[in-house]
Image (cartoon, rainbow, N blue to C red):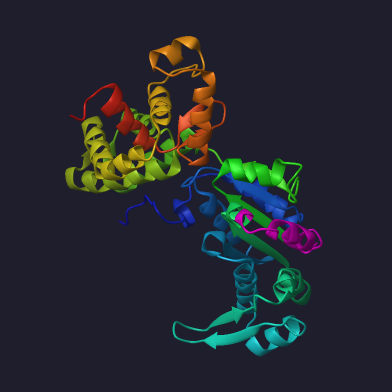
């Protein structure tokens, strides 16, 4: 039997764990023509959620994915949109004739790795702006709703004037649903919640959280059972207490435990401790490199969070960790959030579960050495 736990890539099919409420909500927004702003820390399953919704709607929509991390200019964004729109047509000549008649762009067919298109806009031309309307033209031509997913959308904010141009175009596209995906919450909230931003209130907000414990527990129990590996409920509870139900880290830990369990025929609490510590040890060099980039105050604040301090701004806590004032804590937190090392919902927490464990073991409990 194939290992049922997946990490580092989108989860598909029967390996997709619950998220029924989020999937139905996303589908409803798409079909009603609403734009969606979806954000969460990295490795929370945003891509898996979107792929699940699009798979369910495959007969009703035309999906287009844009990876904003790979975009290096405004023209390149237009080129990528054009390329993806052209690929949705079965006839290349028909697509060019219908869609690019009034757009000044050079298009070349590439056949080295199957049929693909290379599109180029001159930097001196303003034609790249016209390409932003192509999803709407595609929807009108095909008489189907187009769904454009901008993955890591916040990366486009670094190009001067681009958000303003995008808003002026996208707001007129009544046959396109846009899904803006981001992992840098502070930037996404500025883009979509700040009155100074062109994208202020441009869609419905969805914040993806951890998978509920009972849903994760049921999946883990069933997966090990189907693999004929014995695992008790309290062991699964212990796994989820270590990973805090974080999708990526839970899958990563269970992936390794699965192979150990296939060898032994069962998984026990000591096995969980051993594998978890091995995974943290494998990552120690990267944690040390990260630690060296932080200021003393940022390090102290991370230790405070890892230690489970309830009030980071109290005089007692500040004196305990030899910080100057509440403002110094606030300043350190702001930088840690910008670096995606810390996230905040109801409380502050370290985004990387393994990093938190490493900090606690090395600087609080001193067990690593």
15 to 121, vertically: above or below? above
The quadrant of the picture occupied by the N terminus is bottom left
The quadrant of the picture occupied by the C terminus is top left
| Depth check, front residue: 220 or 117 | 117
Q: In which quarter of the image is residue 265?
A: top left
* Residue 83 in sight here: yes
| Depth check, front residue: 151 or 194 | 194
Q: In which quarter of the image is residue 143?
A: bottom right
Q: Is residue 312 magenta?
A: no
In this rendering, position of residue 236 left or right of residue 147? left
In this rendering, position of residue 4 left or right of residue 117? left
| Residue displayed at 74% across by 61% down | 165
Boundaries of the magenta span? 157-176
Q: Does the magenta stretch include residue 160?
A: yes
Image position, residue 299 (x, y; %): 38, 30
Image position, residue 94 (x, y; %): 70, 87
* Residue 21 in sight here: no
């Amino acid at each position: 039997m194939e290992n049922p736990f997946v990490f580092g890539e989108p989860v598909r099919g029967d390996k997709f764990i619950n998220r029924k409420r989020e999937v139905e909500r996303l589908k409803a927004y798409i079909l009603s023509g609403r734009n969606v702003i979806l954000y969460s820390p990295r490795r929370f399953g945003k891509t898996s959620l979107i792929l699940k919704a699009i798979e369910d709607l495959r007969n009703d929509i035309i999906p287009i994915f844009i990876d904003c991390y790979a975009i290096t200019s405004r023209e390149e964004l237009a080129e990528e949109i054009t390329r993806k729109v052209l690929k949705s047509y079965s006839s290349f000549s028909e697509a060019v004739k219908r869609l690019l008649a009034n757009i000044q762009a050079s298009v070349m067919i590439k056949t080295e790795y199957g049929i693909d298109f290379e599109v180029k806009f001159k930097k001196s031309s303003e034609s790249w702006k016209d390409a932003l309307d192509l999803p709407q033209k595609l929807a009108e031509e095909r008489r189907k709703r187009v769904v454009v997913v901008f993955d890591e959308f916040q990366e486009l904010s670094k190009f001067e004037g681009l958000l303003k141009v995008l808003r002026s175009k996208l707001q007129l596209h009544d046959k396109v649903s846009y899904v803006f995906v981001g992992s840098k919450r502070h930037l996404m909230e500025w883009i979509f919640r700040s009155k100074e931003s062109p994208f202020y209130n441009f869609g419905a907000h969805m914040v993806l959280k951890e998978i509920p414990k009972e849903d994760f527990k049921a999946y883990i129990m069933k997966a090990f059972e189907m693999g004929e590996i014995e695992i008790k409920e309290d062991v699964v509870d212990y796994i989820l207490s270590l990973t805090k139900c974080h999708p990526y880290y839970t899958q990563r830990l269970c992936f390794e435990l699965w192979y150990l369990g296939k060898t032994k025929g069962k998984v026990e609490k000591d096995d969980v401790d051993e594998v978890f510590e091995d995974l943290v040890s494998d990552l120690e060099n990267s944690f040390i490199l990260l630690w060296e980039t932080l200021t003393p105050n940022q390090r102290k604040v991370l230790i405070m969070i890892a230690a489970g301090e309830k009030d980071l701004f109290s005089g007692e806590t500040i004196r305990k960790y030899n910080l100057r004032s509440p403002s110094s804590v606030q300043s350190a937190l702001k930088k840690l959030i910008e670096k995606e090392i810390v996230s905040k919902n109801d409380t502050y927490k370290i985004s990387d579960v393994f990093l938190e464990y490493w900090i606690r073991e090395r600087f609080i409990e001193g067990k690593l050495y």
